[in-house]
Amino acid sequence: MPEPEFDTRLPAELVVSAHIRLAAQQGVPIVVVRKGDPQGGAILLKINRLDGTAHLLTQVRADSELVWSPLQALDPMPEADADSLMRRQGEFDPDLWLIEIEDRQGRHWFPGKRVT
């Protein structure tokens, strides 16, 4: 299924809610752990592989394109470490959206390619 194109200037709240619905259509749960700034908050994704590991991805700009990059070199990491790091990032940035995705395949469900 081709990835839908979204204007990166859309409010974060709209982007999050749209992708929750898209993933739900495929039976993949996405939970908003914490809401950030509705308009321009950054999004941090925890992708729970349901095997004790998780990916922690942050959105970065690379060559004028928004992409998803692992927050740390160890990817995937133990889920408990991902939870701890996610919590610390949320304490550091109150505008940050914290999103958890349960997907055994490790898909991030948000627009933009994943880079390593």
Image (cartoon, helix red, strand yellow):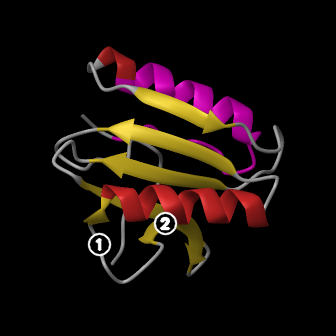
Of 27 and 4, which appears nearest the observer? Answer: 27
SS label for mark 2: strand
Residue linked to disc 1: 75
Of 25 and 100, which appears nearest the observer? Answer: 100
Judge whether residue 113 can be spotted in this image.
no
The amino acid marked with disc number 1 is Asp
Q: What number is the disc on residue 67?
A: 2
Q: Residues within 10 Å of mark 2 (few under 14, many from 20)?
A: some
Of 111 and 74, which appears nearest the observer? Answer: 74
Which residue occupies 37% across, 57% down? 80
Magenta segment range?
A: 3-23
- Of badges 1 and 2, nearer the viewer stands 1
Q: Position of residue 78 (x, y in %)?
A: 28, 63
Judge whether residue 8 is colored magenta: yes
Task: Classify the position of the C terminus by image quarter.
Answer: bottom left
Which residue occupies 43% across, 51% down? 46
SS label for mark 1: loop
